[in-house]
Structure formats: C-alpha cells, structure tokens
Image (cartoon, rainbow, N blue to C red):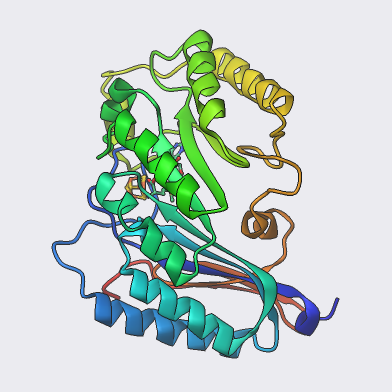
Amino acid sequence: MTPAHAPLGVYVHWPFCKSKCPYCDFNSHVREGIDQERWRKALLTELEHAAREAPGRQVETMFFGGGTPSLMDPATVAVLIERVKDLWDVARDLEITLEANPTSVEAGRFAALAQAGVNRLSLGVQSLEDAALHFLGREHSADQALAAIDTARRHFARYSFDLIYARPGQTVTCWADELERALALAGEHLSLYQLTLESGTRSFTVHARGTFAMPGEEQAAEMFEFTQARLAAAGLPAYEVSNHARPGAACRHNLIYWRYQDYVGVGPGAHGRFAEINAKRATRRMSGPEA
Ligand SMILES: C[S@@+](CC[C@H](N)C(=O)[O-])C[C@H]1O[C@@H](n2cnc3c(N)ncnc32)[C@H](O)[C@@H]1O
Ligand code: SF4
C-alpha cells in the first residue's frame, strides 16, 4: 500500500486531570485553571500541522486520550472532530473513542460528548471495590463507577472499561470474584491491566519504603492466565496483552499501534508514526503543556 492509500489514526492528548493518581506515569498534570479556548486553538493548530505532515490519507479512527479528556469542553471535542473531517477524507465508519473518568460530574457530560461525535467510550473504572479505589487514589467510588457504566451504556453503542488487577493483597479468588461482576456489566470490550510500579511515581517510592507488598510473580502470572481463560470463555478473547473484545469489537485505533500502521499524534507528548515515500517518520510533541 502506498502511503497515500494507507489508513490513518488521529490521536489527541488532553494532558490534565483533577488529581494525580499515585501509580500513574502518563503525561498528566493538575492545573488550577485551564483556558479551554486557548487549548482549542492550540490543538487545532497542531492538527493542521499534522495534516501537512501526513496529507491525502483517509482517517479511520480518532482517539482522545490523556490525562482525562472527559474534562474537555465537549464543544472543543466537536470542533476537533469537524476539523479532522475538513483536513482529511474520513472513513464512513470513523471510530471516535474518548477516555473518561467515572465521577458523577463527568458522567453528566456523556450526552454532550456523544452529541459532539464521540461514538466509543473507554471508562477508567480501575476497580469495583471502594478499598482498592482508595488505595489507587481515585476520585470516584464503586457506586459512581456503576452509575457511569450505566450512563455510558445509554449514550454509546460501544463502551469499554478498564480495571487494574494484581494489586497488593489481592488473591486470585478475590480477582475472580471482581472479574465476574465486571463481566456482568461489560459491553463488547474490556481492558484489564496488571498494576505496574512505574519508576518516578508516588506508588513506586512508597513501595520502596516497604509500606505495601506487590503480589509475587507466580501469583501475578496465575491471575493473568486465569484472566485470559475466563475472558475467552465469556466470548471476549484477548486481542493483545491487556485488551479483550467480542469478535469484531476490538478498538480499531488500538490495533493501529499493534499492527505498526500509521497515526498522527497532537497535544502534549503525543507520538505519531506514519509512512512517507521511502520510510516511516516518527514524531513526538513536547511534553509540558505550557511548552
Ligand atoms: C491514560 S490512562 C487513564 C485514563 C483516565 N484518565 C483514567 O484514569 O481513567 C489509561 C489506563 O491505563 C491504566 N493504567 C495507568 N497506569 C497504570 C499502572 N501503573 N499500572 C496498570 N495500569 C495502569 C489504567 O487502567 C487507566 O485507565
Ligand atoms: S490514571 Fe488517569 S486520572 Fe489518574 S493521573 Fe493518570 S491519567 Fe490522570
């Protein structure tokens, strides 16, 4: 396939969160005030730049990641989607995913986000247990997560949620029980990540002081194997290490990364990788939001 015919994904990074979770090493920042109008203009400018870098393609997927893109003004999301449609040809079944946190305030915006053109929601539930949510430093409760899943189901034909397992003190039996409850709530897709202690995070430092112990390798491996088998039996086999979907329901944007296909990335720290005549070009935007 020549570059001009290769399909393209568009990644948009929103770098802000209400608070920083102790385990997270994503490019996410907490700021007092965010000038939404200024951000809208900056992201539009970067999109225009990306369209000059990778012109003449057909865009198949868009992905709003973060940070917490459910904190974006839905009008900004709408304008960015419209600008993508102006700058490139787009597939008739353009997949537009947005990552959301399940607080009640954000769930209250799902209707507006769907109206803006988002057609797939990925919810960061992380756990269905309050004690675990507290340990993970999350801003939402298990009840709020359940309510947000229900709201997502009403507004989006396609929704997924994330859980983090292999947490301190979690046994295979505890995880099996939580996973069963998750399966009863799941739509077509689930993202199931093992907790990773990333160097430089608060969790990493606190763990180094001996405040909590992580599950051993054997136990974590057992949880992983159990997860793979249970999800396959439930009709959502793994399509990569941590993501599971019903047949045909994989996140197409995610598959672009795993298949070494082409995407552009806009917003702080976003990566892009796309074919030119004789090579692939990799791009990375500056990480600091102010820069
Ligand atoms: C870009 S992040 C977060 C999206 C959204 N801000 C949220 O927190 O719900 C995507 C997902 O990565 C997972 N994740 C982030 N840091 C992790 C870590 N250290 N170990 C395991 N999973 C992690 C979480 O499940 C999270 O929902
Ligand atoms: S896990 Fe999500 S909400 Fe928490 S700091 Fe990272 S990006 Fe923000």
Q: Quadrant of residue 200?
A: top left
Q: Please, which residue is most extreme toward the left here? A: 32
Residue 143 image position (x, y, % from top left): 31, 30
Q: Quadrant of residue 4?
A: bottom right
Question: Where 211 sits versus 237, above or below?
Answer: above
Residue 260 image position (x, y, % from top left): 72, 61
The quarter of the rendered structure image containing the C terminus is bottom left
- In front of the other: 90 or 40: 90
Question: Where 13 sits versus 120, above or below?
Answer: below
The quarter of the rendered structure image containing the N terminus is bottom right
Q: Please, which residue is most extreme toward the front here? A: 154
Q: Quadrant of residue 93?
A: bottom right
Residue at point 52% right, 34% down?
193
- In front of the other: 219 or 120: 120
Q: Is residue 282 left or right of residue 99?
A: right
Residue at point 38% right, 40% down?
199
Residue 11 image position (x, y, % from top left): 53, 67
Residue 121 image position (x, y, % from top left): 49, 53
Residue at point 40% right, 52% down?
100
Tally of marks: 0
Q: Is residue 61 left or right of residue 22?
A: right
Question: Where 116 sits versus 198, above or below?
Answer: below
Q: Is residue 278 visible?
A: no
Q: Is residue 29 visible?
A: yes
